[in-house]
Image (cartoon, rainbow, N blue to C red):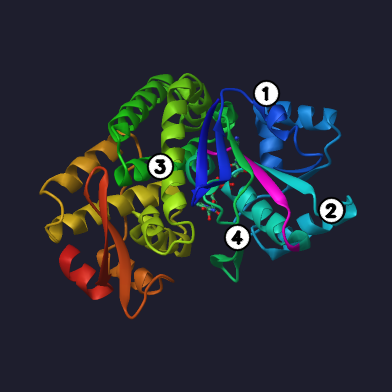
Amino acid sequence: MEQINIYEGEQVISRILVQDGVEGLEECLEQYEHVYAVMDENVAMKCYAAGTIADMLNRRGVPGMLVEVSEETKCMETVMDICGWLLENGADRDAMVLAIGGGITTDMVGFAASIYKRGVRFAYVPTTLLAQVDASIGGKTGVNIAGYKNMLGTIRQPEFTYICPQVLESLPMEDFQAGAAEMLKTFIIEDNGNYEKAITLLKALTEDFIRLCDGATLSDGEARWPEALADRLQDLTPLIAAAAGVKAGVVSRDQFEDGERRKLNLGHTFGHAIEYLSHKRHNDIDHGHAVALGMVYAADLAEKLELAEPGFAASLEHDLDATLLLIYNPYSIHDMAEAMRKDKKAENGKVHFVLPRAIGDVVMHDLTVDEVVELLK
Ligand SMILES: NC(=O)c1ccc[n+]([C@@H]2O[C@H](COP(=O)([O-])OP(=O)(O)OC[C@H]3O[C@@H](n4cnc5c(N)ncnc54)[C@H](O)[C@@H]3O)[C@@H](O)[C@H]2O)c1
């Protein structure tokens, strides 16, 4: 088992455990007398490894609750349901709430636990790649309100995050890609040689998948994704651990996002604009593809500002294309500018951009939306 710590000063405030297999989870729970488990109902149905976890929890007499997961159900009502269920089941101040699911589950359950009886302990078993490399690390919890994402929430650290790659076996391709984009983003921020390794692995996975799809219809092809992924999970584990380690380091240095933690928004200002437009116009560009496009725009902007070498954006574009992460963006820079003007992070007319100068080297740069349009049109 690999252990990565999150620190506040000298003190360990959260542990990330990366382990092959779900069996080690039982040992992690041993020190907690009153455990309550909340699992994504989709995960309970589709993920074999989650079934093994559920069996272990049942054997230990841990009360369990299933939640329906979507950006619509990621709201206060579900948080109230979780808190109500904890109350009905007699959860006290010594309770330990375990969330098993993707980022929506960990965000909601973490939030519920952080306000229930003024805060009880909680831990995560993230079941999506995005949650393993990003959402389950760093202590941000939250829910949506009135169509605005993550507007209500807390920063409170889980006791531990138990990362086990086997749970990804049943993850649909689109959700895997969202995590892959976040993992690459992490390595563009801090490399240590992992960006190249991740691109090589994702390319190999893409080639396996294309080979398995040969001659199949589109839906048949998608059904072969888990087969392609299963063969590469072992090689993915050290990269998940490395990405989790980078995020843990950033959070240890800037838990409350006063500075460095903002770097984790690389690709997200353009990415959110693309997701917003796509949602409004029913084009359905998902998060992973939007972030991948966003990172290429950020690289292009860095080049135009002479922060990055000429050709950097093209080489990033080439890498992302080879891993199936890049798709056609139907929106003009003017469309995206309108969406960016609505970005909650705009301050005094300026938007905070995270710009890559090279792989492993990003800087923060404030620009007005008009300046961005002028540079990228
Ligand atoms: N707290 C943070 O720091 C942070 C960071 C990034 C993202 N987020 C949040 O995370 C959320 C996105 O996370 P996500 O992509 O994990 O979404 P998610 O939880 O919705 O999971 C994506 C989909 O995959 C399904 N699923 C999950 N695990 C599965 C498995 N093993 N097998 C089969 N299906 C599975 C889910 O039911 C869902 O349909 C967003 O709401 C975002 O705001 C939070």
Q: Let me know if residue 249 appears in the view.
A: yes
The C terminus lies in which quarter of the figure?
bottom left
Residue in front for this viewpoint, 320 or 241:
241
- How many residues crowd mark 4 within 10 Å: few (<14), some (14–19), many (20+)? many
Q: Which residues are magenta?
A: 118-128
* Alpha-carbon span between mark 1 and mark 3: 26 Å
Q: Is 276 contained in the magenta span?
A: no
Q: Quadrant of residue 305?
A: bottom left
Indicate if the residue with disc 1 has its beta carbon within 8 Å of ligand 1.
no
Q: Is residue 296 left or right of residue 104?
A: left
Earlier-in-chain disc, 2 versus 4:
2
Earlier-in-chain disc, 4 versus 3:
4
Earlier-in-chain disc, 2 versus 1:
1
- Give the answer, above or below, for where 158 lies relative to 196: below
Give me the residue at 80% from left, 49% from top.
94
Q: Which residue is mark 4?
A: 142
Badge 1 vs badge 3, beta-carbon distance below 8 Å: no
Under circle 3, the secondary element is helix
Where's residue 373, x and y in %? Answer: 22, 69
Earlier-in-chain disc, 4 versus 1:
1
Where's residue 220, x and y in %? Answer: 51, 27
The N terminus lies in which quarter of the figure?
top right
Q: Is residue 317 left or right of residue 288?
A: left
Residue 110 bears which disc, if any?
none
Residue in front for this viewpoint, 15 or 340:
15
Q: Which residue is mark 1?
A: 23
Where's residue 269, x and y in %? Answer: 36, 61
Residue 92 bears which disc, if any?
2
Badge 2 vs badge 4, beta-carbon distance below 8 Å: no
Residue 246 bears which disc, if any?
3
